[in-house]
Structures are given as C-alpha cells and as structure tokens.
Image (spheres, rainbow, N blue to C red):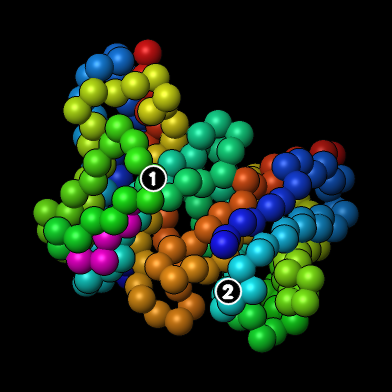
C-alpha cells in the first residue's frame, strides 16, 4: 500500500530564517506531488505541483520554492521566512488517472515569529 | 475558472443527519470529491462522484450531484461525535484539485 510522510510535524521559526519541509511517498512510482497551504480558517491553496523529477510548477508568486530531487521526494523551502508564511502545509500525491484523487500527508504546522 | 464555495459552519445534534453543501463553477469537472480533516491532521478522502452520476451512497454517506446547478452535497446519516471535523469539497481540474474553504461540522450531544 502507498504511504506519504512529511516532516517536521511542527516548526517554530523566526522571521528571516530558512525553511525546509520534506515529503516522501512510498509504495508507488512516478507520482504527481503537491504542496498545499492551509491558512487559519481558510481553504487549501495550491503552492506547487510536480509531475516528475526536476519538474516544478508554481501556482502563486511567493517567498517559497519547491524541489523534487528524487521520484518520491518533494521539498518545500524558503531562504528567508516572512510572518505571512505561517500556516499548515500539506503534501499530497496522486496519479494521472481518470479519478484523479489526491492522498495527503499529516501536515506540517509552521509558525513564524 | 475554478471556484468552489461552501458554508463555513454546521452544528448538528448527535443521531441526526448532517447535510453539507457545496457549489462549483467549472462545468467541465469530471470528478468531485469530499474530504474530511480532523484537528491537526491531513485530509482524508471520504468519497468521490463522477460527473455523470446523480447520487452515490457509501454506508452512512450519501453524495448528491446536481450538475445543472453545479451543486454537490454530502449527507451523513446518524451523525456521531467522531464526525466532528472540517469537510472539504473539491473539484478536479487539469492537473490539480481545487478545494472549498471547508465546512466545520460540530456534533452536539
């Protein structure tokens, strides 16, 4: 069966510090990978998606970047965090099938102070 | 374009039925989904429905789709305290899912 892991689960960082959130998927190959952000009381905003190694598409201009160094690894980064980067970050994977459903990790809570 | 809307809150008594509503705008969406998020956790896929279906039932869950009005609903029968969560409606786009803001369901005794 497929599993998805992301870490760290909780992170408190000062403004201006770097960020690295990691996500890995097991039990499948060549998944589509996604980073969503959930701000308090709001829905999910798609930040990045990737259909293959080294292929990253950005949905919104922002202070964040993403990389996919391996088939089942997706990393969300920032060189200098802003207060507005606080939120709940969710990694997800899916396959390019007709049904198109996504499967989510447990999330990473980022608080920027 | 893609825009999914949901009411933000629903309070329901334990044992009653819950109905969560959603509207979407992309008439070309082929699949629509319901996800559940418990506090501090990721999203769990509850069910999905193909756009040529009107209804799908899975145990206590019933999904109704009115494609003409672009309206999707999720009915939870015999609502339990464990059903307290945020429920997200989503529609399938070309390469992603677009989500509503989520409906927070509170089950009271």
Label disc, if present, on residue B29 of the rendered structure: 2
Decide which of B35, B89 is in the foreground and name it: B89
Decide which of B34, B23 is in the foreground and name it: B23
Q: Is residue A50 magenta?
A: yes
Q: CA distance from mark 1 to mark 2?
A: 22 Å
Q: Which residues are magenta?
A: A48-52
Decide which of A32, A6 is in the foreground and name it: A32
Instruction: For the residues labelled 1 and 2, say whether their Cβ atoms are less than 8 Å apart.
Output: no
How many circles with numbers are drawn on the protein? Answer: 2
Residue lying furthest bottom? B52
Residue B26 visible in image: yes
- Name the residue rendered at 44%, 31% in the picture: A87
Q: From the image, which quarter does the N terminus of chain A lie in?
A: bottom left
The residue that label 1 is drawn on is: A60
Q: From the image, which quarter does the C terminus of chain A lie in?
A: top left
Q: Determine whether B53 is above or below B59 in the image.
A: below
- Name the residue rendered at 81%, 58% in the picture: B19
Q: Determine whether B25 is above or below A11 in the image.
A: below
Chain letter of disc 2 in the image: B
- Name the residue rendered at 42%, 24% in the picture: A84
Q: Secondary structure at mark 2?
A: loop
- Name the residue rendered at 30%, 32% in the picture: A63
Residue B43, percent across and down?
A: 50, 52
Q: Is residue A81 left or right of residue A92?
A: left
Q: Secondary structure at mark 1?
A: loop
Q: Label 1 neighbourhood size at 10 Å, few (<14), some (14-19), many (20+)?
A: few
Label disc, if present, on residue A96 of the rendered structure: none
Q: Is residue B75 left or right of residue B31?
A: right
Magenta portion: prevailing SS class: strand
Q: Is residue A13 magenta?
A: no
């Amino acid at each position: 069966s497929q599993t998805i892991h992301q870490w760290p689960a909780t992170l408190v960082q000062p403004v201006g510090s770097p960020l690295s959130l990691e996500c890995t998927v097991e039990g499948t190959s060549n998944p589509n990978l996604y980073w969503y952000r959930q701000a308090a009381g709001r829905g999910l905003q798609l930040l990045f998606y990737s259909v293959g190694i080294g292929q990253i598409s950005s949905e919104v201009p922002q202070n964040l970047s993403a990389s996919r160094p391996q088939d089942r690894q997706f990393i969300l980064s920032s060189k200098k965090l802003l207060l507005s980067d606080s939120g709940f970050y969710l990694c997800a994977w899916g396959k390019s099938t007709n049904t198109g459903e996504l499967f989510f990790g447990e999330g990473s809570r980022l608080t920027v102070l | 374009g893609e825009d999914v809307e949901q009411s933000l809150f629903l309070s329901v008594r334990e044992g009653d039925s819950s109905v969560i509503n959603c509207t979407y705008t992309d008439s070309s969406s082929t699949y629509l989904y319901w996800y559940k998020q418990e506090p501090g956790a990721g999203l769990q896929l509850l069910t999905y429905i193909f756009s040529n279906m009107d209804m799908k039932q899975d145990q206590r869950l019933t999904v109704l789709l009115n494609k003409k009005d672009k309206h999707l609903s999720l009915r939870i029968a015999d609502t339990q305290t464990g059903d307290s969560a945020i429920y997200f409606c989503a529609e399938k786009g070309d390469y992603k899912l677009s989500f509503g803001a989520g409906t927070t369901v509170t089950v009271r005794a």
